[in-house]
Image (tube, rainbow, N blue to C red):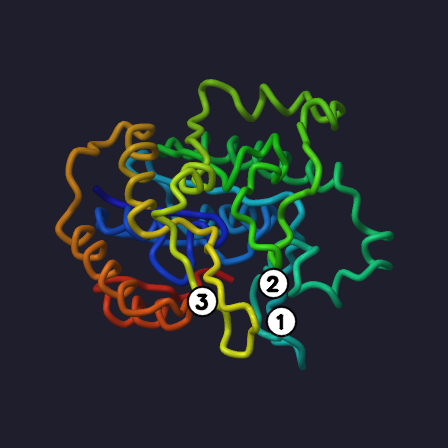
Amino acid sequence: MSRLFTFGCSFTKYTWPMWSDIFGLEFDHFENWGVSGAGNICIANRITECLVKNNITPDDIIVVQWSSHIRNDYHTFEYLTDGPDKEAGWKTKGSIFNYLNVKKYNKKWLDTFFDESSYAMLSLNAMYSTQLSLENTGCKWAMTSIGDFSKLGTDFTVDHASYAETPNHPVDLWEDKSLLLPYKDKIWNAKFNWVEPIGPFAWNRMDEMYWWENSEDSTDKELWCDPHPSLNLSIDWLYNKLKPALGLDNTKLTSQQLGWAKECALLKENTNNLDAFGELASTTLPNYKKSYRGY
């Protein structure tokens, strides 16, 4: 195969290899444009940047994983003088309601700028405009998401409390926000290649997820379930959902993919510390790259 380009949030690029990195081992050229914490505006803009910088051909494959509608992204080319987001590039800290964003998105900001229906509309606009752009390239492409977007996070059953992605009440986008109904058939049109959301696929098999210990200074000694798919679950989703949707052979893992699976199993046996596991994965897995890509 020739080139693979993948986009998304931490469900595409995380502390250990996701489906994207595993899939990338099968290609001559692979670019992972995923960014942890990315919202859909960031994802759509990074797709546009990639299309501008690359001459996409019918031989290429592009896979997009959409995230949550309650994330706010912004970008700077210059380093900021201080603060946690001083690095240049996309500022992506996940849900505007999570623990990382408490000071940035305070009550005054929320009362002034946040309207959930509008944020859902912005995500839908990003999805549809991206579909039109990808259609124009002639490449083979597919889309997925963390959960079923029409449920607006209510199917995030393994949402760590501090991530704050899950509403505390049932939601149906098309019933509760019926003003947005015209988007439904445009975006989830049968001709567009949507793949089963990766989150619920993994969360239905809790015993195969990764569980981590809390920080040393925490009084809670119980292990917590990381909502991101384990390497084996990522492989399973890739081979049983994504590759068939793209019309690709899914009968046999490559030797490198098998090697990654074996190595990650050994690493997990030796540690329940998330940071240690990620560091070991970065240094021991051949051809695994985690560097930031793009502006």
Compare marks 2 and 3 and give the one earlier in the sequence. 2
Residue 193, quarter of picture: top left
Give the residue drawn at x 71%, y 42%: 119
Say which element carries label 1: loop
| Dot 1 and dot 2 residues touching (CB under 8 Å) | yes
Q: Which residue is mark 3?
A: 213
Residue furthest bottom in the image? 81
Between the residue at mark 2 and the residue at mark 3, the CA separation in whole angstroms equals 27 Å
Residue 38, quarter of picture: bottom right
Residue 72 in the figure: left or right of residue 62: right
Dot 3, crowdedness within 10 Å: few (<14), some or many (≥20)? some
Nearer to us in this view, 85 or 161: 161
Question: In the rendered view, would you say 288 is above or below 258?
Answer: below
x and y, in percent, of residue 60 in the image: 31, 40
Q: Which residue is mark 1?
A: 85
Q: Which residue is mark 2?
A: 91
Give the residue drawn at x 46%, y 61%: 223
Compare marks 1 and 2 and give the one earlier in the sequence. 1
Dot 2, crowdedness within 10 Å: few (<14), some or many (≥20)? many
Query: Looking at the image, is mark 1 or mark 3 nearer the viewer?
Result: 3
- Tag 2: amino acid: Lys
| Dot 1 and dot 3 residues touching (CB under 8 Å) | no
Say which element carries label 2: strand
Residue 208 in the figure: left or right of residue 251: right
Question: In the rendered view, would you say 104 is above or below 184?
Answer: below
Question: In the rendered view, would you say 53 is above or below 174?
Answer: below
- Tag 1: amino acid: Asp
